[in-house]
Amino acid sequence: MKSVRLARLLGGMGVLAFCWAAAAQAEDSVTVASWGGAYQEAESKAFFQPAAKALGITIKEDTTGGLADVRLQVTGNAVKWDIVELGADECARGTKEGLFEKLDYNLIKADGIPEKLVREDWIGIAYYSVVLIYNTNVYGENGPKTWADFWNVEKFPGKRALGNFPNETLTVAALADGVPLDKVYPLDMDRAFASLEKIKPHISVWWDSGGQAMQLMKDGEVDMAAIWNGRASTLVKDGAPVSYTFDQGVFNPDCMVIPKGSKNKDLAMKALAQFVSPELQANLPLYIGNGPVNQKAFETIPADRQPVIVSAPENVKKQVLLDADFWADHLVEAQERFDDFLQQ
């Protein structure tokens, strides 16, 4: 009997030890979900791996399709992610739905990050921008430089492409119609659609992905396009005959959140604090065309590299920031109207 009891005792201790080990492992890891592909690979090198090393934890990675995925996990009480990257308009919508944990700004140092991107339950993580790109074999070095030029089919004849994304493309349309950078928001939707009506007959393709936009320019299927800056910089690096400018770029921030019900909320907060720190933010442009949201990162980025970084201080001045709160309220309406517009 003694041997049986001893076996049971040891077995019970083994189960407890296993449970403690599993608990420790759970506490020492967080799962981050981002957009996948080359962008997430860059984030992993710039943010996730250095943060894991600094904190002595494991950062697991997954991919997300956006706010709908977070909503499904939170409302179903089945949260498997600890940190999720979303578009800023999605973050603003998620706030209204109560999907995110409040952030601890005693732990997360947000100085250096624009106030519009520091919210109670979300924070900016990286920038990209919609920029104007053109084929230098067609236009030389004197191609279109502004969206008004893009709209000027007499001075700059040729095939054109715009993105099938109402928030970005309607902002571009407002700029083309002469709205100053600081007056774009709140967006006059009627004016923006009227501007789009003028250029619509001259748009050869309404692209749906960054890869498609790149291919259109690379193959010469269009002579100019709206394109995401990361894709534009890749084309330049690959030797394509193109040029682009940050002038009148439509500056689009991504953000990060901790879904409500995260099992590792406290550790996720520490990891997020690392991701937005100036030191790790400065890493991002080493791997991808996206730019830091923390302007303090530019204190350590060499001055000669800054002109090609989308969120460098001098480039920020040339662009308009997509208004997350505006699109949180109006994107559904705009999408329906945009779809109807394209089908007419």
Image (cartoon, rainbow, N blue to C red):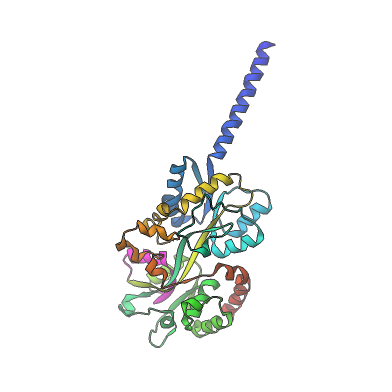
> Which residue is at 32% across, 80% downward?
142
> Which residue is at 57% across, 59% downward?
66
Q: Nearer the viewer, residue 208 or 190?
A: 190
- Where does the N terminus fall, quadrant-wise? top right
Residue 5 position, x and y percent, is 68, 15
- Most distant residue in the right direction: 1
- Where does the C terminus fall, quadrant-wise? bottom right
Q: Which range is magenta?
A: 221-240
Q: Is residue 2 visible?
A: yes
Would residue 67 be found to the left or right of residue 195 on screen? right
Q: Is residue 183 above or below residue 297?
A: below
Residue 194 position, x and y percent, is 55, 84
For the image, the number of numbered tags is 0
Would residue 98 be found to the left or right of residue 63 on screen? right
Residue 10 position, x and y percent, is 62, 20
Q: Is residue 194 above or below residue 112?
A: below
Residue 88 position, x and y percent, is 54, 63
